[in-house]
Image (cartoon, helix red, strand yellow):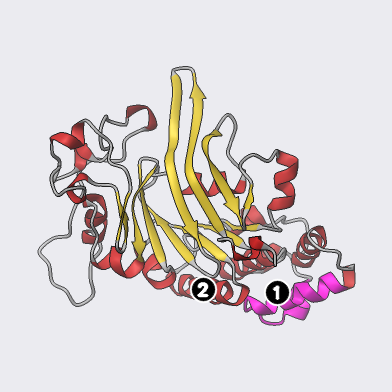
Amino acid sequence: MNPASHSPALEVKGLSVEFPTRRGMLTALSDVSLTIARGEILGVVGESGAGKSMTGMAVLGLLEPPGRVCAGEIHIGGKRTDNLDNDQMESVRGRMVGAIFQDPLTSLNPLFSVGQQLIETIRLHSDRSRADARAHGIHLLKQVGIPGADERIDHYPHQFSGGMRQRVVIALALAGNPQLIIADEPTTALDVSIQAQITTLLRRLCREQGAGVMLVTHDMGIIAETADRVAVMYAGRIIEIGSVEDVLARPKHPYTRGLMGSIPALGARVERLTQIDGSMPRLNAIPPGCAFNPRCSAVGPRCLKARPVLVPEAQGAVACFIHHGGVA
């Protein structure tokens, strides 16, 4: 039996990404480690600039030059991919890892029908004939809930609504039967009712296909409804990771507690929501010690000097000195 068949959909070990500039090297990701099992959805959350999308782009091998992976390893379905060149990554994208981005119009070519794009993608990653690829394309459109798929396959992207276009993009992401899907803010451009349909669809397809999903979002509501586990990022690092139920109900890191406290709860009356003062530090201005220390209400002397590492706990892991012996 192929040992890769038992490998996680994604395993990232100590990933660091840097960007050389005239003023020196900027570290965008630092020592990021995570695992996504097959059939599991991992939500990745944090403010803008936390490193969520950067992590997804690194996994896809789509870092904008001069950005580069400077440390760590990326394994997709048991295959190491961070050391592959562009041509080798072309065969990985689509076949081993699919992508769903925020704006479906950026993923679809307006000059070609949906069917032409699906058929080309299917044939690129398989030995199907054109007729067989078309039949499979219709099957995929039906699978993602597009009515009248037999006719709609010949329509162009502009003939679909935003929600239907995103369903087409999901069909394209599934066309190569990948083991991993990177979904980067897949519902942000859609209204709330369509968001719910897309997240429900994504969860169902994840279960049916057995693919792992990295769901990048800033919306904790989407995470609560869709993900199995959640990783919270801040200034290019994972600061807390665990099951959705545990992290949302019992957040351990002060930043995660602030995120949870800023969300209004139905039926609960509070005087005011929690506010996290300040903003995410720029890459060239990350403070020494814990990067969150200028904004943290529980900051202590250790936080100003040393950077806490992610320490495993019974229900996940957290990078905070309060939980590393109880004193910051």
Q: Nearer the viewer, residue 181 or 320?
A: 320
Q: Position of residue 288 (x, y in %)?
A: 26, 29
Q: Position of residue 206 (x, y in %)?
A: 56, 71
- What residue sits 19% from the left and 77% below the top? 267
Which quadrant holds the N terminus?
A: bottom right
- Callout 2: helix, strand or loop? helix
Q: Which residue is mark 1?
A: 140
In the rendered view, tell whether residue 212 sits above or below residue 201: above
Q: Position of residue 33 (x, y in %)?
A: 44, 48
Query: In this rendering, would 217 be left or right of 118?
Result: left
- What amino acid type should be assigned to the residue bearing mark 1? Leu
For disc 1, the neighbor class at 10 Å (few under 14, some 14 to 19, many from 20) is: many
What is the magenta range? 132-153
- What residue sits 64% from the left and 58% below the top? 98
For disc 2, the neighbor class at 10 Å (few under 14, some 14 to 19, many from 20) is: some
Q: Magenta: predominant secondary structure element?
A: helix
The circle drawn on residue 203 is 2
Judge whether residue 259 can be spotted in this image: yes
